[in-house]
Amino acid sequence: MQMKQSQFDLIKRQLKRLTAVEGGFYQKKFEGIDIDGIQTQSDFEKLPFSWKGDLREAYPLGLQAVPDEEIVRIHSSSGTTGTPVIIPYTQRDVEDWAIMFKRCYETAGVTKLDRIHITPGYGLWTAGIGFQAGAELLGAMAIPMGPGNTDKQLRMMMDLKSTVLTATSSYALLLAEEIAKRGIGERIHLRKGLIGSERWGEKMRKRIAAELGVQLYDIYGLTEIYGPGIGISCDDESGMHYWDDYIYCEIVDPKTGEIVPDGEIGELVITTLRKEGAPLIRYRTHDLTRFVLGDCACGSQYPRIDTLIGRTDDMIKVKGVNIFPSQIDELLRDIEGASSEYQVMIDHLNGKDILTLFVEREKGADSEQLEHEIHRRFKLKIGITIVPKAVGIGDLPRSEKKSTRIFDNRY
């Protein structure tokens, strides 16, 4: 993707500022690099990447690029393992994030007349407060529920006549199933759903949309780069628009780090153009996507990346074969009687890897036939023999946050 002159000017300004911070993260990382010698996009693409390991080593506030008196908030990544990643924000960062989030709502057709039901978590995680700040800047009514307490969620949804749901796909599915189970669909006024935080398959999307009666939008972001709200899908559903006046995106080969041709799948790398508290240069997100080329039918001039197909660190290797969760999603999508919900258990017994795939079967589906078809398709499409297990709808655990689908018990 060709870098705009305005983006290059902002990047140059960031580089000069960051390398001038005495003892700062990027002054150390770019030691020996002639920043003034970066005159072209090609020069910029020679700069070293940043990655999550760098950020963990900078714990707690090694990323901070402004004096303490300019920091108004910190957030932390939602991961539960390893050293946390702490991201400091200035007042300008907070305001910019709200502006981007407001654009997301507007792209999804949300207006100040809407009532936005916010279920993602608050606190150190970026999600809840980001959805709220964008809603308030838009002028819509924010209903800051946070996760959990499904009884209260549904009561508030009915009584306050919420029109927009914001949630992880896992919790959106849980709410949709509860609404159907309780027979309260006619008392629900939702018309749109903004779903983020985890990758989800087409089958799951269709279930949520049908059961809630809403139009769904993929919202994108990560704590290291503001949080959710740096990109969103539109009514055309052909990728996610991202705000290229705030972030610059590259797609690279995950193995070599080289830029891939436009339109090819690779790892998304992001540079923040305006961030003050903790700017990031060439940050490897681990998210796999591609640039969507050409103009969007919705009319937006903002560029697009495709809906995420997975993460480089999501890959599992079983019997010598690399497997991504997205492959399992795609496989189940085309199997009649298979629900969107599945769980993978990998064990090592008697010197062999054994992959057991639990899949919820739709009502009326025959378990034996479903297992036979899953077994056949997995061998045909992915190349290994598995143990399929059909279970009832709702038998697999639901989550109020992100769902864990793969359990590797070999290590």
Image: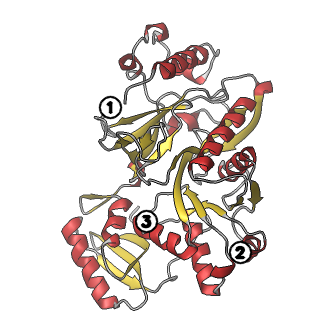
Percent across and percent down for residue 180 are: 59, 82
2 or 3: mark nearer the eye: 2
Q: In terms of image quadrants, where is residue 16?
A: top right
Image mark for residue 33: none
How far separated are the C-alphas under marks 1 and 3? Answer: 30 Å
How far separated are the C-alphas under marks 1 and 2? Answer: 46 Å
Q: Is residue 223 left or right of residue 311?
A: right
Residue depicted at x 57% and y 73%:
212
The amino acid on which the numbered mark 3 sits, given as a three-letter code, is Ile
Image mark for residue 406: 3
Residue depicted at x 76% and y 56%:
141
Percent across and percent down for residue 13 are: 57, 16
Q: Alpha-carbon neighbours of circle 3 within 10 Å: few (<14), some, or many (≥20)?
A: some
1 or 3: mark nearer the eye: 1
| Residue receiving disc 1 | 259
Image vertical order of residue 173 relative to residue 275, above or below: below
| Residue receiving disc 2 | 154
Percent across and percent down for residue 237 are: 44, 54
Percent across and percent down for residue 154 are: 71, 75
Image vertical order of residue 336 relative to residue 384, above or below: below
Q: Secondary structure at mark 3?
A: strand
Q: Earlier in the sequence, mark 1 or mark 2?
A: 2
